[in-house]
Image (spheres, helix red, strand yellow):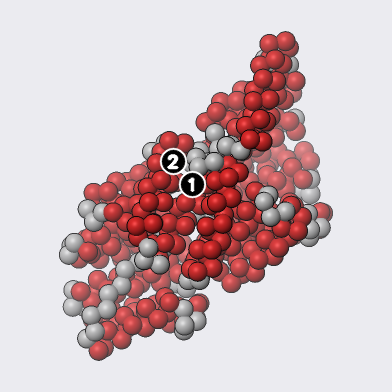
Amino acid sequence: MSGGHYGCLKLRERLGLTVKGRLGVEHPSTIRASANLAATYGHLGRYAEAEVLQIEVLKQSTKLLGVDHPDTIRASANLAATYGQLGRYGESEVLQIEVLNQSTKLLGVDHPDTIRASANLAASYHQLGRYAEAEVLEVEMLKQRTKLLGVDHPHTILASANLAATYRQLGRYAEAEVLEVEVLKQSTKLLGVDHLDTIRASANLAETYGELGRYAEADDIQNDVLRRRMGFLGDRHPDTLLSMWLLASTYKETQRRPEALELATKAHRGYVEILGESHPDTVEVAAFLASLTAEQPVLFVEVVKQSTKLLGVEHPDTILASANLARTYGQLGRHSEAKSLQNDVLQRRTRLLGEQHLHTLFAMLSLASTYKKTQRRPEALELATKAHRGYVETLGESHPYSVQAAAFLASLTAEQPVDHAEGGR
């Protein structure tokens, strides 16, 4: 925790106790002080403490002001955002939809609170893996903010960053990169290099570079982001833990496994302490850690079980967990179980992401590899050809993924022992 954040927290804690003691729990000033303290807890990643306060703020605001008052709607929006941070995405979505409906009715579609409500609902869709729905809202939101606030306003820049993140999840990396380069440029100009939003913009661009296989660029930026977040937020803030995890992923991709293992272990320990073992982020980083340390499928079975329970069977993270379990089955020679899972993963990714998404192409090559091992070469050849064509069209012939797919395809006709395993986090 930085000194500035700590000082703000202590000041607001003392203020909250003083106001509550003098004026009582139902006084508007007490409610406002509680809301401010909850916001500080949220900035520090202490979401459970923020939730307790926000529930009370919403209860008191509803009682004193009514359900349709802008302050009550804002209290609902804040609680919904905290639910999202706690991994309770379903509860967050329900509240966000209600907030958006109320804001639109009371304030109009162009009011900043309504636009913010759209942004928050889009964030919920993003967390739920419903990226196409998120994109629709985010494109409209970027238009509105550009029109009302101008291209250089921080809220417009944030809207661009959110849309870029959705493009990345949809596999539209070139579009994501264009937006993220501009976001980083504007954030640096307006807010300075050390502002948390600028640091976040750097982290997002690095993630896109990683998806594009530009690991050296990703590595440089991610190391800088981790260093700055450690300095400003401490080593237990969720943003710092995410930086550890993403850098560990880059280390894994560049065959630096000892360093990846060290960072992933630290990140997982932090997630467990801050968010709990059942939080979706904790489950996902546990799966990544298991991919570095274990070949026993029991760990991956548990990850699939937890991810299905928390996120649902169609969520991209659940599908990734299934893909990792299938890969482990394949490494253990349990090809029948691997094939069954890989078929399911391919069908779900094709349905949710489309045939040209990198994760779908990974799934094609993984299944093709299993077909090859079980002497089903015609099926392997058909899938590998399709995957290679997709990589070339999406990333170009010289990209490492295209080269790897070409080598695997050649092995099907030249009897070369080239294998394929799914990459990425």
Pick the front one: 45 or 405: 45
Quadrant location of the C terminus?
Answer: bottom left
Q: Residue at x 78, y 60 (%)?
A: 151
Labels 1 & 2 near each other (Cβ < 8 A): yes
Q: Is residue 279 left or right of residue 257?
A: right
Picture quarter containing residue 362? bottom left
Q: Is residue 321 left or right of residue 242?
A: left
| Residue indicated by mark 2 | 270
Crowding near the residue tagged with mark 2, few <14, some 14–19, many ≥20 C-alpha atoms within 10 Å: many
Q: Residue at x 72, y 10 (%)?
A: 22
Secondary structure of the residue carrying numbered label 1: helix
Please determine whether, in this image, residue 275 is positioned above or below residue 255: above
Q: Position of residue 54 (x, y in %)?
A: 61, 28
> Which residue is outermost to the bottom?
414
> Residue 299 — which label?
none
Amino acid type of disc 1?
Leu
Quadrant location of the N terminus?
Answer: top right
Q: Position of residue 378 (x, y in %)?
A: 25, 83
Please determine whether, in this image, residue 325 is positioned above or below residue 1: below
Instruction: Tell me which numbered mark, 1 or 2, is placed earlier along the sequence.
Output: 1
Crowding near the residue tagged with mark 1, few <14, some 14–19, many ≥20 C-alpha atoms within 10 Å: many
| Residue indicated by mark 1 | 241
Pick the front one: 222 or 391: 222
Pick the front one: 255 or 126: 255
Figure label count: 2
